[in-house]
């Protein structure tokens, strides 16, 4: 089945593999002078398309074109550069789609191929370095200013698994970057700590009840939380190089489990079973209070439906499995129980907070959302701001023909209160077939944007990004 949703996905996600460098000149409104720093963004952007067309690509397939939008005293500059991994460079040299994707085979066998690495999911500044990240490879380092490729970083040879994910958690109080890895062979989970000076101070591995895709995780002041979804790897099809969808299956017979361990070195993981089956790409935040851990997340209640949708969004198929809802999980550390509450009927993804509060109690959250009535495409029409103190959510009104991605919060200055700052958001305008960076006042997200910066080159909506404050 191909329908309007697939066409929309295909249009919004279709690659635009252009590396460019220019001062942004088409600016509506005024860029706040308080914004001084760089917004980095990442997403799949396949340079050499398969002969079968980009519709044959899985949602996760594609080379990593890193975008850096530098803000300086009311002006903005765009730079885009590919993460030039060995496999990327080799493919350019061969001039043919020769590494394959999650759904399709390479079009030509090449001799001694390097590992297929496309760090296309997130881009994270830490310890003076910039990492392009994807969950099936180690981080790929790039120059924070020029975006020149430096190469893979393997945690000073301390890796205990094959890869780490694209979702590190940086504790703003300690400056530590916590990051986990997962894999379909034992040990199923690994955890690392990278100190502010870039050294690796912790590398430990854990078993899990079953091997599952674990895209993201959470930390609190004293704990680490691993969300194990109702989804399981099957090693057989993986080893045979079959499609991703043959190698991972939804398990509606298994409730989610959450592994919780202390941040202290050498700690054991305790597993907490949730009442329901589900899968999450992204927690919003987690924190401790009164002997409990509270964690909000965007949860898919039908993991197999999600997997089917991931498979088909760019081509033909029914993408209605893209329906995550905001949930709150409450872990009682003494009784080892887990409660869950569905917080909203509105589908939501890409939850973010004021990053200075990652792991600590926050009040405000931001996410990309859609009303159930809007469509079932899994794409997002607007930004919603949530009040964890129980106040009403605030929605930015959708604009006809526009779709939005992950909202990234930037504080007005280092001492600003939570929520006192800006939301930076990439939007796709289908009428113009163009992209813009929108700057919203976080305290008035339903007001007109402070500024809208139209980019000279369309940027596929992509996945994640982060802000690096200028020093
Ligand atoms: Fe993600």
Image (cartoon, rainbow, N blue to C red):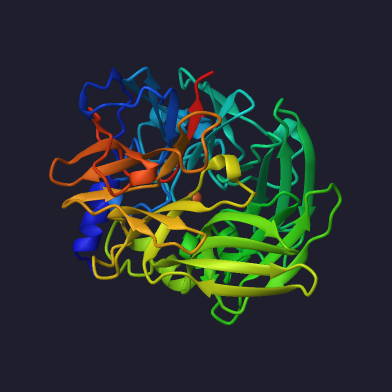
At a point 28% along the width and 43% down the height, the residue shown is: 427
Q: Nearer the viewer, residue 143 or 355?
A: 355
- Residue 448 screen position, x and y as percent: 23, 42
Q: Residue furthest right?
A: 266
Q: Nearer the viewer, residue 104 or 200?
A: 200
Compared to residue 14, the image places residue 4 above or below, namely below
Q: Quadrant of the C terminus?
A: top right
- Residue 442 screen position, x and y as percent: 39, 43
| Residue 100 appears left or right of 278 | left
Q: Nearer the viewer, residue 371 or 244?
A: 371
- Residue 40 screen position, x and y as percent: 44, 32
Q: Residue furthest left?
A: 431
| Residue 45 appears left or right of 288 | left
At a point 51% along the width and 58% down the height, the residue shown is: 281
Compared to residue 267, the image places residue 329 above or below, namely below
- Residue 114 screen position, x and y as percent: 56, 35
At a point 38% along the width and 65% down the height, the residue shown is: 347
Q: Nearer the viewer, residue 357 or 17?
A: 357
At a point 24% along the width and 66% down the height, the residue shown is: 375
**Residue 53 seen:** no
């Amino acid at each position: 089945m191909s329908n309007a949703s697939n066409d929309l996905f295909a249009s919004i996600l279709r690659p635009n593999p252009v590396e460019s460098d220019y001062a942004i000149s088409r600016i509506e409104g005024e860029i706040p002078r308080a914004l001084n720093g760089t917004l980095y963004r990442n997403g799949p952007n396949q340079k050499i398309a398969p002969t079968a067309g980009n519709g044959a690509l899985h949602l996760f397939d594609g080379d990593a074109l890193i975008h850096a939008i530098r803000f300086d005293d009311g002006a903005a500059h765009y730079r885009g550069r590919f993460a030039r991994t060995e496999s990327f460079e080799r493919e350019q040299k061969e001039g043919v789609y020769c590494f394959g994707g999650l759904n399709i085979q390479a079009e030509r066998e090449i001799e001694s191929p390097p590992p297929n690495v496309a760090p296309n999911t997130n881009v994270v500044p830490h310890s003076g370095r910039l990492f392009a990240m994807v969950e099936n490879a180690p981080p790929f380092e790039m120059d924070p200013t020029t975006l020149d490729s430096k190469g893979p970083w393997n945690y000073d040879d301390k890796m205990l698994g094959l890869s780490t994910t694209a979702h590190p958690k940086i504790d703003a109080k300690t400056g530590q970057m916590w990051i986990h890895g997962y894999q379909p062979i034992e040990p199923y989970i690994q955890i690392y700590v990278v100190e502010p000076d870039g050294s690796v101070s912790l590398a430990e591995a854990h078993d899990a009840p079953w091997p599952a895709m674990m895209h993201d995780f959470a930390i609190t002041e004293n704990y680490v939380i691993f969300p194990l979804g109702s989804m399981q790897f099957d090693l057989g099809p993986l080893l045979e190089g079959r499609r991703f969808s043959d190698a991972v299956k939804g398990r509606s017979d298994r409730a989610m489990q959450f592994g919780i361990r202390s941040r202290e070195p050498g700690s054991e993981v305790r597993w907490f079973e949730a009442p329901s089956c589900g899968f999450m790409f992204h927690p919003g935040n987690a924190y401790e209070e009164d002997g409990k851990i509270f964690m909000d997340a965007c949860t898919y209640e039908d993991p197999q439906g999600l997997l089917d949708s991931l498979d088909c969004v760019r081509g033909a198929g029914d993408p209605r499995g893209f329906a995550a809802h905001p949930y709150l999980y409450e872990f009682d550390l003494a009784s080892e129980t887990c409660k869950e509450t569905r917080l909203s009927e509105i589908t939501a993804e890409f939850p973010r907070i004021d990053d200075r509060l990652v792991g600590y109690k926050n009040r405000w959250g931001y996410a990309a959302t859609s009303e159930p009535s809007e469509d079932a495409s899994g794409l997002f029409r607007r930004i919603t701001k949530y009040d964890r103190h129980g106040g009403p959510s605030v929605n930015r009104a959708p604009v006809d023909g526009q779709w939005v991605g992950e909202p990234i919060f930037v504080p007005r200055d280092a001492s600003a209160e939570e929520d006192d700052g800006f939301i930076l958001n990439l939007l796709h305008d289908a009428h113009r077939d163009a992209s813009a960076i929108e700057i919203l006042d976080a305290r008035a997200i339903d007001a007109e944007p402070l500024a809208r910066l139209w980019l000279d080159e369309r940027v596929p909506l992509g996945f994640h990004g982060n802000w690096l404050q200028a020093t």
